[in-house]
Amino acid sequence: MKTLMREWDRMVTKEGVLYRSVKDNRGSEPNLQLVVPFELREQIFQQLHDLAGHLGADRTFKQVCKRFYWPQMFTDIQQRCKSCKRCCLRKVTSSQQKEPMVPIQTSAPFQTLAVDFLTLERSTCGRETVLVMTDLFTKYAITVPTKDTTAKTTARALWKHCFQIYGCPARLLSDQGPNFEANTIQELCSMYGIKKCHTTPYHPAGNGQCERMNRTLLNLLGTLPPEQKQKWPEHLPEVIHAYNNTVHASTGYTPFFLMFGRHARLPVDFMIKGSDEKQPIPTAGAYDSWVQEHHRKYVSAFNHVRDNLDRAAQRQKKAVNQRLRTHLLIPGERVLVRNRKVRGRCKIQDKWEEDVYI
């Protein structure tokens, strides 16, 4: 109650419903957060965490705070994510890199498109490979399940699922796999004026954005229930949609917004009455002014992204030199046991067994 009283000046009512009016540091219009009672918080968490790819606490919090508010919201979400059984059994902490890296500089969408193949367990429909495409500026991800990794299949997937929909990138970055270095890909890039780039051999960190996206995708698919893991191609569109609509730590924006200039309307938005009234529809003859205002906001967002990417690059360069810290186990401590039972391809299987006590 004391926390709510401190926020009293921000509280507003709309049609008998209590909201909290907040304004971010970008100078945009105030956002109305629905004040949620205790009884409905678990339902919101299920919608924006359990049913949205089991994303981490920071991304889940950013999704929730765009729409809702309650006291100590971040602490509640953080504790709820830590206690999520699916997250605990699947996810591992990111290993620190030991070698310094040089971040790739980008300043506009589709300036550099990084591509890579991810091999998973064979699904019920026979698919076991995914072509992962990531725009290095917006962090927007595109995934295509494929029957194989040949150059012909790669070229067809690039053209049909990327170039025809989003346009052609200025550069195409990949490793030196034979499917990416084949004449078919070279001719495709030459035909559309795309500069083909590749990483050095045996150095996957050169395509670090795709490698990181692969780990994120494995974590998202890995949180599926065991009976649904073999149906991962069916769930791939929904988990990628969830990823593209959460704020990326490096840019400060959602990949969807940076790619399309607007926020995606999610099913949870219909829980807030009047949410569809926030975006006015331009009238006849007002399109020019709407485009100018849209362009102004877009340019402002891009400037923020460039600054955020520069700061993120500096943080990454500093982090790679930090030493790994060891953790001493003591009797009576509760731990998870590494899952060694699964054999063969097991990239999206649970990494941990049930917890035990030392």
Image (cartoon, helix red, strand yellow):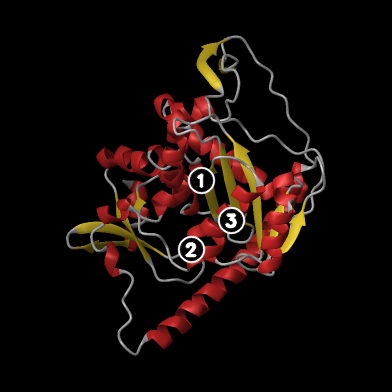
SS assignment at label 3: helix
Give the residue type that dot 2 points to: Phe
Mark earlier in primary sequence (2, 1): 1
* Eye-nearest disc, 2 or 1: 2
Q: Which residue is mark 2?
A: 257
| 82 vs 157, nearest the viewer | 157
SS assignment at label 2: helix
Report whether 75 appears left or right of 131: left
Residue visible at 37% across and 54% down in the picture: 6
Q: Which residue is mark 1?
A: 58
Residue visible at 49% across and 53% down in the picture: 244
- Residue 91, position in %: x, y? 55, 31
Q: Which residue is mark 3?
A: 158
Q: Residues within 10 Å of mark 2 (few under 14, many from 20)?
A: some
Kindly check if marks 1 and 3 are in contact, taking CB atoms under 8 A apart as contact: no
The answer to whether one can see residue 319 in this image is: no
Q: Residues within 10 Å of mark 1 (few under 14, many from 20)?
A: some
- Residue 142, position in %: x, y? 53, 52
Mark earlier in primary sequence (2, 3): 3
